[in-house]
Amino acid sequence: MANNDLSIDLEELRYLQTIAKRPRVLSFISSEISNLEKQLKDAAPVAPTPTPTPTPVSTNQKVAAEPALKYTTLGSFSWDQDNDKVKIYVFLEGVDQEKVQAEFNAKSVDIKFHDVQGKNYRCAIPNLNKEIVPEKCKVLVKPTRVVITLVKASKGNWLDLHFKEDKFKPNLDKERDPMAGIMDLMKNMYEDGDDEMKKTIAKAWTDARSGKVADPVNKYG
């Protein structure tokens, strides 16, 4: 039965209730009125719960790019060694151990010191004299200096921290002319020698080219 019909029936029963005299009739009418009121209540549409409108999130927000850090290169430091380790001493005050970034590789070291009295510093050796053991190396911050400990991959003495190609080692490339390696060696000796050495090598060089001396190395070897 439609809600409209139920409402009409309910109104009519309420009217009959006002004119009825017999108790039994009044009880029956009251019961029907209650029944119709319940039906009307159950049939009433339930208002839907409003769905919360999600707050729109802007996807056009620009994230500021983090500026690249600038570093002051620490080119001056001291070092010493024993048979197993090399220690580099960087004299820098105000360094925070937590703000030190260390990168050790087999043949290189790159240490960065952040926020040292408002500045960033860097100590890097891109080509070490010999190989190290990266996982055993460490950085220790002290009040007035920083100690960088490098553990040698093989025991022995280092002539320098930096790798330097031995200019006095002849080139042993088998495909090259043997004389070319000797001439390269003489050239390197000439560049690093004193005036007397340069004069002697220049004469030997000239004689070798003119054929006066068959083997310039035998004369000065």
Image: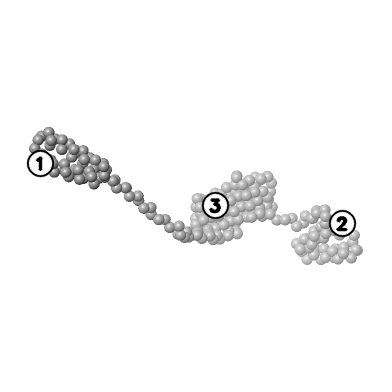
Amino acid type for the residue under numbered disc 3: Gln
Q: Nearer the viewer, mark 2 or mark 3?
A: 3
Specify whether residue 147 is in view: no
Nearest the viewer among 171 and 198 is: 171
Against 88, is 20 above or below?
A: above
Helix, strand or loop for disc 1: helix
**Residue tagged 3:** 101
- Spatial CA span between label 1 and label 3: 99 Å
Amino acid type for the residue under numbered disc 1: Ile
Give neighbour class at mark 3: few <14, some 14-19, many 20+ (Cα, 10 Å).
few
Q: Nearer the viewer, mark 1 or mark 3?
A: 1
| Residue located at (12% from left, 37% from top) | 26
Position of the C terminus by quadrant: bottom right
Question: x%, y% of residue 49?
Answer: 32, 47
Question: x%, y% of residue 122?
Answer: 57, 57
Question: x%, y% of residue 181?
Answer: 81, 57
Nearest the viewer among 4 and 163 is: 4
Residue 218: which numbered mark, if any?
2
